[in-house]
Image (tube, rainbow, N blue to C red):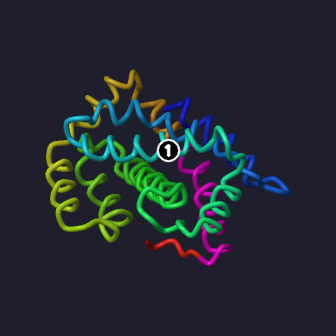
Amino acid sequence: METVADAFKGLAATVNSRKPQVTVKQFSDACSLFSGLFGILDTSFKFAKMDYVGKLNDLAAASRSISTLEEMIDKDIEAGCVKKYGSHTRNLLKVKQGLEMIKVLCEELLATEGDDSLKDAATKAYNQVLFPHHQYNIQKACATGLNSLPSKSLVLLLLGEAEETINVHLQSYVTASTPVIAYLDKLFLSKNLGIDW
């Protein structure tokens, strides 16, 4: 988790600069670091892993020919495909929503320190961020996945993290991801795209 927190500190420094220009590569590289967590939760969230990784793979492929996130959105707008399924911009929005859910999950885990259950924190994070954007069948699959989450202590063991250090990394991710998510919201809103689709 330390690697993830450090990557998002780098993104936060970029978005907090005078003229923030987040490259597609920097963004997709940072977001891809969550793949290890999805690997641990594979049984509970197999579909989420496939969906998230698929969208990240699209952004990574886009980074070979498109420099910045803003340029990527502009190209989709010009092509008239910005909100279409599979567009880079739509995939960016869905990855942003995933980052928001992880942020809320981290906040909940910090607020319930000492509780070994992931289920309540993950359910609150899912319901707050992703539930409104999912169709009924995905909501049901998520509910099933949430009910089969391993304990927090098992996840820490599999991640090779100690309880003492994980809270530092969780807080670092929350702090660093906040301006990154705000930057993405501002970027979508500046293009008159909204953020609820």
**Residue 92 percent location from the top left of the image:** 52, 55
**Residue 55 percent location from the top left of the image:** 44, 47
- Mark 1 belongs to which amino acid? Asp
**Residue 167 percent location from the top left of the image:** 47, 39
173, above or below 154, in the image: below
* The C terminus: image quadrant: bottom left
* Farthest residue, direction right: 18
Secondary-structure class at tag 1: helix
What is the chief secondary structure element of the magenta stretch?
helix
| Horizontal relation, residue 154 to residue 85: left or right | left
Q: Where does label 1 land, which residue?
A: 58
Please name whichever residue, 40 or 164, is drawn nearer the observer in this view of the structure.
40
* Residue 37 position by quadrant: top left
Q: Residue at x 38, y 64 (%)?
A: 129
Magenta segment range?
Answer: 172-192
Q: Residue at x 44, y 56 (%)?
A: 86
